[in-house]
């Protein structure tokens, strides 16, 4: 009764009704009446209900108005986003369900509170979250919260693949790949037209050529990148590679290779014994031994000079020959030599009793990497015409490269017991996979590159470097289609293993 009395006192006071002193006994009786007690109880319950309802309504509204941003998705790319109710302060949600996910390729995992899947459609979507909070009954319809999600189109789908003109005078295949024996090694090579060219139906400007000369044991591999701005660079790169093979096929006569073999064997012997000689010098201090050592050193330097001279003459003449043939081709067809602008890298190698000799030449921004058998050493066989040192991209069609004092530094020479990989690539591979020139000097970057080829890539394309793997060139060609934002140039990669 006390609760009823207090309630009625407040009610009457609020209404301006004062209970006179002579009416107190009457008021007590009034407060004790069953009907009035029942009415007050009902009013209290209704008030409590309204308070509860208001709190529920505001809580629901708070959740609905809570700004929630989830990461954008991309069509065809695995997506996962966390919607952590506890972190969001939604721990009073007792029921949740998402609508509209199936049609866009997503699902929601209640256990792990993650939105995941493989988006199927692109656009701006409104995901509907159905939820209930504590205090709502089972029969209460669920509340709705709209969560915006942007699904971007697959960037690859925005690129067209238009065929190149087969009627063009200098047409060549948009994509080629090959796998062959190359002496005691094998070569796998692929060259594919870049997306930027495919998008407009233009041609593959890259090219390659290789050959093993059984009569002398030498093998040659050439790779060239035709300049995108040059009208017929696709022909320039093709001529450059093929003429390198033609040159060494004729220039490396039995007499020439015999003389070089003798030089190489002598030089290799000196190189292999040098460490022991150095060790002995420390312990033999008399003048006679010192004189003998000086004589040995002079002979060694002379042999080294003869090797350098051979490399400079023959590899240099090969480059000059290519330049001359390109010049003659341009004159014959009456267009500027610059229309054939192409980079050019090539490497020769031969196996001897002591190991392998690897020679190289490069002009342009395409690297040649040589890795030893256990992948503990890397030799970058050329420097690139990029940055301050190179002064910008150079092409085999530029006559000034032959008169430059840097021409002699374009040659590479390496004696090695054995090698695991000899790799030549155009900048369509180098740019996305190595990013900057400095990374070409880092062994770990080449090891990462090999891991990429062997399956550590988004597309999960695995290339098994095995001479019995007859699918290797097709796999390499498939791998060449990797996605790299901003890198859509032609791609050529030759790997000797």
Image (spheres, rainbow, N blue to C red):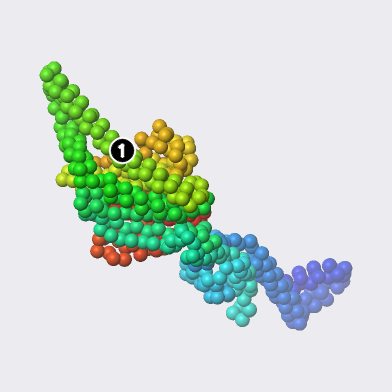
The image quarter containing residue 390 is: top left
Residue occupying image coordinates x 13% and y 17% = 287
Residue occupying image coordinates x 59% and y 64% = 150
Image side of residue 301 versus residue 51, left or right: left
Quadrant containing the N terminus in the rendered view: bottom right
| Residue 287 visible within the image | yes
Point out residue 46 in the picture as x, y percentages from the top left corner: 72, 75
Residue 74, compared with residue 493, is above or below; it is: below
Viewer-side residue, 130 vs 326: 326
Residue occupying image coordinates x 48% and y 37% = 391
Point out residue 234 in the picture as x, y percentages from the top left corner: 45, 55
Residue occupying image coordinates x 32% and y 58% = 188
Residue 115, compared with residue 431, is above or below; it is: below
SS at mark 1 in the image: helix
Q: How many marks?
A: 1
Residue 439, compared with residue 457, is above or below; it is: above
Image side of residue 264 versus residue 123, left or right: left
Point out residue 381 in the picture as x, y percentages from the top left corner: 33, 42
Image side of residue 287 versus residue 190, left or right: left
Image side of residue 91 versus residue 399, left or right: right
Point out residue 137 in the picture as x, y percentages from the top left corner: 61, 78
Question: What residue is disc 1 on?
Answer: 313
Viewer-side residue, 249 vs 122: 249
| Residue 441 visible within the image | no
Local packing at callout 1 (Cα closer than 10 Å; few below 14, some 14-19, many 20+) is few
The image quarter containing residue 490 is: bottom left
Quadrant containing the C terminus in the rendered view: bottom left
């Amino acid at each position: 009764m006390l609760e009823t009395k207090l309630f009625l006192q407040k009610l009457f006071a609020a209404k301006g009704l004062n209970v006179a002193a002579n009416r107190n006994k009457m008021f007590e009786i009034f407060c004790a009446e069953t009907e009035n007690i029942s009415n007050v109880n009902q009013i209290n319950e209704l008030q409590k209900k309204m308070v509860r309802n208001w709190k529920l309504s505001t809580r629901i509204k708070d959740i609905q108005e809570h700004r929630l941003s989830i990461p954008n998705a991309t069509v065809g790319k695995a997506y996962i986003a966390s919607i952590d109710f506890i972190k969001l302060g939604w721990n009073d949600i007792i029921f949740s369900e998402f609508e509209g996910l199936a049609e866009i390729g997503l699902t929601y995992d209640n256990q792990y509170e993650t939105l995941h899947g493989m988006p199927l459609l692109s656009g701006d979507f409104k995901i509907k979250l159905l939820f209930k909070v504590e205090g709502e009954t089972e029969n209460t319809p669920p509340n709705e919260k709209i969560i915006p999600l942007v699904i971007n189109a697959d960037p690859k789908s925005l690129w067209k693949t238009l065929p190149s003109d087969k009627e063009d005078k200098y047409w060549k295949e948009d994509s080629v790949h090959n796998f062959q024996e190359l002496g005691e090694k094998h070569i796998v090579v692929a060259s594919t037209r870049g997306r930027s060219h495919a998008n407009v139906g233009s041609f593959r400007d890259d090219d390659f050529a290789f050959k093993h000369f059984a009569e002398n044991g030498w093998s040659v591999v050439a790779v060239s990148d035709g300049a995108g701005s040059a009208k017929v660079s696709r022909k320039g790169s093709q001529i450059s590679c093929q003429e390198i093979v033609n040159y060494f096929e004729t220039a490396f006569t039995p007499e020439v290779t015999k003389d070089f073999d003798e030089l190489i064997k002598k030089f290799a012997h000196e190189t292999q014994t040098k460490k022991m000689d150095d060790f002995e010098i420390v312990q033999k201090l008399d003048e006679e031994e010192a004189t003998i050592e000086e004589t040995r050193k002079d002979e060694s330097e002379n042999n080294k000079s003869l090797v350098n001279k051979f490399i400079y003459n023959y590899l240099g003449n090969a480059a000059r020959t290519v330049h001359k043939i390109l010049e003659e081709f341009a004159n014959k067809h009456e267009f500027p030599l610059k229309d054939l602008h192409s980079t050019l890298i090539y490497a020769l190698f031969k196996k001897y009793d002591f190991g392998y000799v690897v020679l190289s030449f490069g002009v342009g921004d395409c690297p040649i990497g040589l890795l030893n058998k256990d992948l503990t050493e890397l030799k970058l066989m050329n420097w690139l015409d990029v940055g301050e040192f190179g002064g910008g991209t150079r092409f085999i069609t530029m006559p000034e490269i032959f008169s430059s004092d840097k021409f002699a530094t374009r040659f590479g020479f390496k004696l090695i017991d054995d090698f695991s990989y000899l790799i030549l690539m155009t900048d369509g591979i180098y740019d996305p996979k190595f990013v900057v020139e400095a990374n070409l000097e880092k062994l770990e970057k080449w090891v990462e590159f090999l891991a990429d080829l062997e399956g550590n890539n988004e597309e999960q394309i695995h290339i098994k470097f095995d001479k019995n793997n007859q699918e290797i060139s097709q796999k390499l060609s498939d791998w060449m289609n990797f996605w790299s934002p901003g890198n859509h140039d032609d791609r050529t990669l030759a790997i000797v293993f």
